[in-house]
Image (cartoon, rainbow, N blue to C red):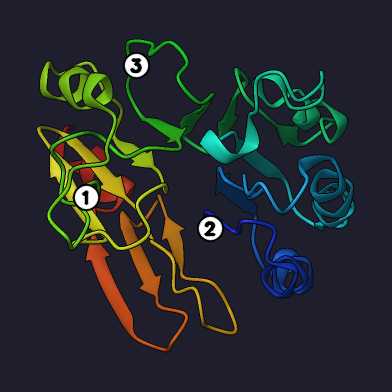
């Protein structure tokens, strides 16, 4: 089972929760904004608080940078989220990495990085959802998604699944763009635990769990064995 969380913004309560539950999952995916770019909250001390939590996780980890994780001119650690390299080790993947997990290939795409052409059975971690998708449109009506990613998916060049964050209050937590699914758990800022997805790629389903307790089931695709048998 995969755990997908996003946009912690240095919330230590959520970081402690993640450290506590990490061993329950076979893979943890964090889609950016672990830090909080706030002029009253210096970033370097935030990095020093976040890194020990990431190192404490008891499962394989894939993490990508968001806009709050990068700060040009604020020192080498924050330039292009270089601080993520301090947590990179075996079974920890960061910006620009790719790896196999079961039948799928995962790609960790950095904030404002280049978009590859997806192969079969791929999952991308990308901080901003695809522009035009309901996962990118905030409830106030503005689209805060990545325009290039949206066009990439509409051209049929995207993966089976894109895991994102960035938009805290999307009109929907899941959507499809052509053949690609987009998941964005959003943020429940006052909740004791964060919003999150639990994803079973083999069964083709995702369960969204709201920090306030609501649960929704999303059917992504048929179970892989069913799909394989139907092609024989």
User: What whole-number distance in Å separates the C-alpha atoms at marks 3 and 2?
Assistant: 24 Å
The quadrant where residue 188 appears: bottom left
Q: Earlier in the sequence, mark 3 or mark 2?
A: 2
Seen in the image, is 169 located left or right of residue 29? left
Residue receiving disc 3: 119
The quadrant where residue 84 appears: top right
Query: Looking at this view, is 140 or 8 the one in front?
Result: 140
User: What whole-number distance in Å separates the C-alpha atoms at marks 3 and 1?
Assistant: 17 Å
Q: Which residue shows up at 40% across the image and 44% down it?
A: 164
Q: Earlier in the sequence, mark 2 or mark 1?
A: 2
Quadrant position of the N terminus in the picture: bottom right
SS for tag 1? Answer: loop
Q: Which residue shows up at 82% across the image and 58% down it?
A: 58
Residue receiving disc 1: 221
The quadrant where residue 73 appears: top right
**Where is residue 167 shown, x and y percent of the image?**
35, 51
**Where is residue 183 shown, x and y percent of the image?**
32, 51
Q: Residues within 10 Å of mark 1 (few under 14, many from 20)?
A: some
Query: Looking at this view, is 80 or 26 the one in front?
Result: 80
Residue that extends furthest to the front in the rendered view of this protein: 40
Is 147 above or below relative to 40?
above
What mark, if any, has residue 5 been given in the picture?
Answer: 2
| Residue mark closest to the camera, 2 vs 1 | 2
Q: Which residue shows up at 22% across the image and 25% down it?
A: 147
Is 201 above or below relative to 16?
above
Is 170 above or below relative to 122?
below
**Where is residue 214 shown, x and y percent of the image?**
34, 86
Q: Earlier in the sequence, mark 3 or mark 1?
A: 3
């Amino acid at each position: 089972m995969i755990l997908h969380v996003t946009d912690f913004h240095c919330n230590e309560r959520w970081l402690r929760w993640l450290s506590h539950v990490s061993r329950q999952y076979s893979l943890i995916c964090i889609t950016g904004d672990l830090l909080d770019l706030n002029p009253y909250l210096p970033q370097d001390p935030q990095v020093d608080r976040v890194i020990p939590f990431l190192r404490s996780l008891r499962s394989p980890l894939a993490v990508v940078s968001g806009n709050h994780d990068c700060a040009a001119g604020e020192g080498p650690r924050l330039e292009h989220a270089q601080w993520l390299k301090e947590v990179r080790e075996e079974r920890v993947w960061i910006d620009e990495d790719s790896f196999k997990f079961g039948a799928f290939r995962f790609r960790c795409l950095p904030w404002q990085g280049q978009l590859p052409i997806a192969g079969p059975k791929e999952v991308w971690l990308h901080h901003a959802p695809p522009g035009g998708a309901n996962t990118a449109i905030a409830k106030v009506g503005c689209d805060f998604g990545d325009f290039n990613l949206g066009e990439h998916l509409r051209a049929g060049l995207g993966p089976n699944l894109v895991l994102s964050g960035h938009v805290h209050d999307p009109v929907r937590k899941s959507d499809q763009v052509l053949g690609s699914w987009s998941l964005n758990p959003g943020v429940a800022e006052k909740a004791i635990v964060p919003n999150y997805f639990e994803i079973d790629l083999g069964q083709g389903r995702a369960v969204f769990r709201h920090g306030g307790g609501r649960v929704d089931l999303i059917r992504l695709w048929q179970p892989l064995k069913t799909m394989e048998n139907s092609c024989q």
